[in-house]
Image (spheres, rainbow, N blue to C red):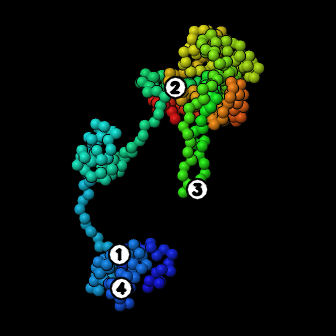
Amino acid sequence: MAGIIESSPAHQNFSRYDIRVIIKFSIILGKDASCIHKDLVTVLRENAPSIQTVRKWVKAVSEGRDDMEDEPRPGRPVTACGDANISKVLVSLSDDRRKTCEEISTETSMSRTSVLRVLTNKLNKKKKFSKWVPHLVTDEQKESRVNFSRNFLRRFQTKQNDFLGRIITGDETWVYSWDPETKRQSAEWRDFDEPRPEKVRRKQGALKVMHMIFFDMNGVILRWPVPIGTTINAQYYKKVLQDKLRPAIRKKRPGLLESGILFHHDNAPVHKARAVKDVLAGYKWELMEHPRYSPDLAPCDFHLFPKMKEHLRGQRFETEEDIIQATKVAIKNLDKCSYVTEFKDWLQRIEKCANNGGCYVE
């Protein structure tokens, strides 16, 4: 018998029912309990039943039992997930939603397994880690985000692509002489038994250049590196708008100045200065309001700058000019279609913000 079973490739996957049938067959062959157990151990090794179990079934078959299935057992009612225990868990959680199963178990005199079963199966709870957000926005700030989003969507529904096509958005960002790769960028394909690659945690380089970048659905209109040592105040920002951005729009986007520009930037103090607002009003550029603490709704912050810096991470630049040239190349290497995608993503984020009560959008 053992040789027959051993020839099967799935000899260790026998169910309890299968083993009992083998025991019954062995009894018919005239084998006793000890011999049957020895055969089962030879074939099934650690999966073989104990000698006591084999003797029990030898006795049962010898006394005339034909059915090898388990007999139905009424058991006792399960109370671990009853209403009383559910109430105990809810009361415990009402004090502190960060409690562990062990803490709830101690407090309610329930087993840890029962607590976990109530939480997951009955209350449909799942322990979720906190997510990082730029700012803990107040109800008033959430309302401002919702109002901005609804107004944006209302205007888009009226004009659609004509509305998006008139928007120019921009911001400032630092580009460093050294920015370490992200964990995702440094991932390597390795064998399963190989250790993970190691990286030394390093700070960003000391040398850095501020870049002012303005763009629309068709790509970057102006990339302006701010000379080291220059302070970006209202007067400097105004000068860039007058002497750099406006001529760049006239050159790269013929007709856009005449059709009416919708100008978007965040709420940095420089951007809100009276001198800047006066220049925009003089050009008849409509200033789009941006809610406070909302980098998730600013295309520069959620798309352009991260994508641009992906190309720069892991590279070392020795001089200011090296940083400027590398940034120029990084922007040039971005897919032209990515700007259209970015504006569509912006629209989707705004729609989510309007529908989720002004909470941050991932």
Residue for badge 2: 294
User: Does residue 322 appear left or right of residue 173 in this picture?
Assistant: right
Q: Is residue 130 above or below residue 223?
A: below
Mark 4 surroundings within 10 Å by alpha-carbon count, few (fewer than 14), some (14 through 19), many (20 or more): some
Tell me if I can see residue 307 in this picture: no
- Confirm or deny contact between disc 4 and disc 1 (CB under 8 A): no
Q: Secondary structure at mark 4?
A: helix
Sequence-wise, the earlier of marks 3 and 1 is 1
Q: Secondary structure at mark 3?
A: loop
Q: Secondary structure at mark 2?
A: loop
Instruction: Give the Cα distance between marks 3 and 4.
Output: 46 Å
Residue furthest to the bottom: 30
Instruction: Give the Cα distance between marks 2 and 1.
Output: 65 Å
Q: What amino acid type is highlighted by mark number 1?
A: Pro
Residue for badge 3: 191
Q: Is residue 100 above or below residue 146?
A: below
Instruction: Give the Cα distance between marks 2 and 4.
Output: 77 Å
